[in-house]
Amino acid sequence: MHLRVDPITRRGAATRAQVPALLKGLIHGPNGRSPSLECAGYNSCPVTSVSAADVEGAVLDQVQRLLAAPELVARTWAAAKRDGEDEITEREVTILLADFATVWNEIFPVEQARIVQLLVERVDVQENALEVRVRTEGLASLVGELRQGERRAA
């Protein structure tokens, strides 16, 4: 048996192979399992097909909003101090996270994927909602990296 692959399909597959899925291994269905293992049949699932691009877009929007949330900034600051960034101020954490949010679209997809894996613990897809769990320790690590980058640039 021969499978014929047209150039558009081949190009799409090559692009997917080069650009990592941002949420690979992080998406879980209504009972906490991988959506593909969720149900015995398509029609019995409360959550059927969900576009990966839509989920990624929604998750990235939520992460962007969280980067500016005062509670998360405070938790990130506390975690950064625990991780040895003793002299860092809450204001500096706020500025670093805000600056990072503005340059997100300028970084390479591979780096975006690494950062998402660092920041996002899991994504639970429910029938009418998405729940994103963020790793505060990952944010503290990101703040440390951003701070080192600023020191090198200075």
Image (tube, grey):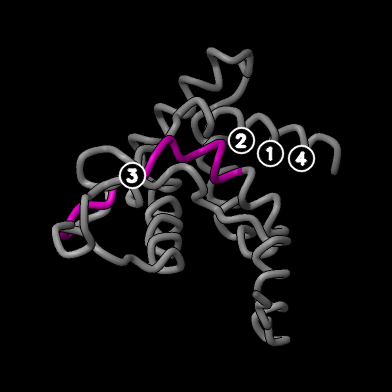
Q: Amino acid at mark 4?
A: Glu
Q: Are marks 3 and 4 in contact (CB under 8 Å)?
A: no
Q: Nearer the viewer, residue 100 or 51?
A: 51
Which label was assigned to residue 146? 1
Q: Label 2, on which residue?
A: 142
Asked which secondary structure carries label 2, the reply is: helix
Where the C terminus falls, by quadrant?
Answer: top right
Q: CA distance from mark 4 to mark 1?
A: 6 Å
x and y percentages locating residue 117 in the rendered image = 55, 40
User: Considering only order in the chain, which callout, 4 or 2, is on the residue closer to the N terminus?
Assistant: 2
Q: CA distance from mark 2 to mark 3?
A: 24 Å
Q: Label 4, on which residue?
A: 150
Which label was assigned to residue 28? 3
Q: Nearer the viewer, mark 3 or mark 4?
A: 3
Q: Amino acid at mark 3?
A: His
Q: Are marks 4 and 1 in contact (CB under 8 Å)?
A: yes
Report whether 41 appears left or right of 101: left
User: 7 above or below 93?
Assistant: below
Where the N terminus falls, by quadrant?
Answer: bottom right
State which quadrant residue 55 falls in: bottom left
State which quadrant residue 102 falls in: bottom right
